[in-house]
Amino acid sequence: MRRSTFEQFVIVLVLGLLAAGTSWLLRVAEPDEPPAAEGLTNTPDMMVDRFTLQRFDVDGRRQYVFSAAHMRHYASPERTELDRPELLFLGGEAPVRAEAIRGTVSADGETVRLSGDVVMSRAALPSRPAATLTTQALTVWPESERVAGRVPVRYEEGRDVLVAGRFDADKLAGELRLGDGVTATFRR
């Protein structure tokens, strides 16, 4: 059976339209940019200026205040970055303040890492002068009031000065352990 020229023209036109439609669908379905590395993003999903978090004990007394000038939360990988973070611990004999240029909070919220000109200070006690610890990085566990650092630290209490390569402290105003090349100057 022989087809007319008109029928052949319609078949070629329909096939051409089908091919053009398929080509258009493929272009529309393809992403414009190559996909970013899976699971990584540099865009925060939440930003807060003048961030403050307060923790209270079972009797309603403040245990600590955690604040930062700016806070950014990222979903993937989950992390929280802070500018000018500050932790104020109120549960001991005297308030203890830790501040830095930058900070990060672990995904579970249990660990805070401070970095850049870290200063931790304790107000004077009736039997002891004020104390200051300076370093470039430290890790804080706010719930247990524990801190640790693996970079050089300088601890001053009154006129006494201790310098060490690492440190650990429990209950912030309580026990301080220094290690890795400790030098001390005591003035009486």
Image (tube, rainbow, N blue to C red):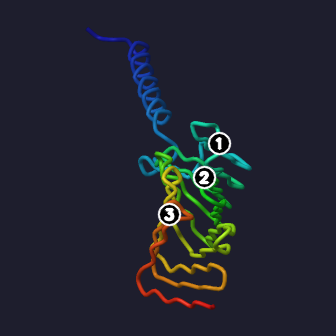
Residue 87 position, x and y percent, is: 63, 57
Q: Say which of 117 and 14 sits in front.
A: 117
Q: What whole-number distance in Å separates the C-alpha atoms at marks 1 and 3?
A: 22 Å
Badge 2: residue crowd in 10 Å (few <14, some 14–19, many ≥20): some
Q: Secondary structure at mark 3?
A: strand
Residue 156 position, x and y percent, is: 61, 80
Please give the residue where the numbered disc 3 appears in the rendered image: 147
Which of labels 1 and 3 is toward the front? 1
Task: Check the image and report above or below for 20 versus 69.
Answer: above
Mark 2 or 3, nearer chain start: 2
Q: Amino acid at mark 1?
A: Arg
Side (left or right) of 30 relative to 98: left
Please give the residue where the numbered disc 2 appears in the rendered image: 91
Which of labels 2 and 3 is toward the front? 2
Residue 54 position, x and y percent, is: 65, 44
Q: Amino acid at mark 3?
A: Val
Furthest-top residue in this view? 1
Q: Amino acid at mark 2?
A: Gly
Please give the residue where the numbered disc 1 appears in the rendered image: 61
Badge 1: residue crowd in 10 Å (few <14, some 14–19, many ≥20): few
